[in-house]
């Protein structure tokens, strides 16, 4: 990989994106930004999940990402990125800084997502109803990307596929 790299990890609630993104960032020693954790930090008492709040969270992620990339760090960003409009500013940042951009779209079958979102998760407040609300709104990713299928017990396989894609540009799924 190049000196600084921007990695976007996208997917619907319960897909396994945070589990994957955190382990990937640890494996490649990258900075890790999670939209849910950042939202809790920015809005510790009440989170509305409004469009305005979402914009503030994504803007903060963008500014933090730029600072990290300028300092030659690799950044893994973990967020739904369900709208193309949420992704565009990160694409533009990578282009502006001449930074390599990789995108992973994490998916899982709906039964597994329902199981995952039915229990309290430390980093996410999204339940199955949020997944159902966002599912029809998820816009196709219009840039080269790798889609990985989370099956609940295949994290090593996902990480191996991701590393192959990052280091060799080859998709294995």
Image (cartoon, rainbow, N blue to C red):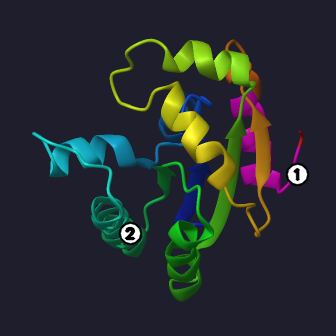
Is residue 82 within the magenta segment? no
Label 2 SS: helix
Q: Secondary structure at mark 1?
A: loop
Q: Is residue 165 left or right of residue 60?
A: right
- As displayed, is residue 155 above or below residue 68? above
Q: Nearer the viewer, residue 41 or 94?
A: 41
Q: Are marks 1 and 2 in contact (CB under 8 Å)?
A: no
Q: Is residue 136 left or right of residue 149?
A: left
Q: Is residue 59 left or right of residue 129?
A: left
Question: According to the image, label 2 marks what residue?
Answer: 62
Image location (x, y in percent) of residue 93: 50, 79
Residue 163 colored in magenta in the image = yes
Range of residues picked out in magenta: 158-171
Q: Nearer the viewer, mark 1 or mark 2?
A: 2
Give the residue at the far left of this rendering. Answer: 45
The mark tally for this picture is 2
Residue at (42, 69) in percent of width and height: 69
- Is residue 141 positioned above or below 70 on the image? above
Q: Which residue is rendered at x = 67% and y = 60% of the image?
A: 102
Give the overall secondary structure of the magenta segment: helix
- Name the quarter where the N terminus is drawn: bottom right
Residue 20 horizontal/vertical position (percent): 58, 32
Residue at left offset 66%, top offset 54%: 138
Distance between mark 1 and mark 2 Cα atoms: 27 Å
Identify the residue at image location x=62%, y=68%.
84
Which mark sits nearer the N-terminus, 1 or 2? 2
Residue pointed to by mark 1: 170
Quarter of the image for the C terminus: give it: top right
Q: Is residue 31 above or below residue 130?
A: below
Q: Is residue 18 visible?
A: no
């Amino acid at each position: 990989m190049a000196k600084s790299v921007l990695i976007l990890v996208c997917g619907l609630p319960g897909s396994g994106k945070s589990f994957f993104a955190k382990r990937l960032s640890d494996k490649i020693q990258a900075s890790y930004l999670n939209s849910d954790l950042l939202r809790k930090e920015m809005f510790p008492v009440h989170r509305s999940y409004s469009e305005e709040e979402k914009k503030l969270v994504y803007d903060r992620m963008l500014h933090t990402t730029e600072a990290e990339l300028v300092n030659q760090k690799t950044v893994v960003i973990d967020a739904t990125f369900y709208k193309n409009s949420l992704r565009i500013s990160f694409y533009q940042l990578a282009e502006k800084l001449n930074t390599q951009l990789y995108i992973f779209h994490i998916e899982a079958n709906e039964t597994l997502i329902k199981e995952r979102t039915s229990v309290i998760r430390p980093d996410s407040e999204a339940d199955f109803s949020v997944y159902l609300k966002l599912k029809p709104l998820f816009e196709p990713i219009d840039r080269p990307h790798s889609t990985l299928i989370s099956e609940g017990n295949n994290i090593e396989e996902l990480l191996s596929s991701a590393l192959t894609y990052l280091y060799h540009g080859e998709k294995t799924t």
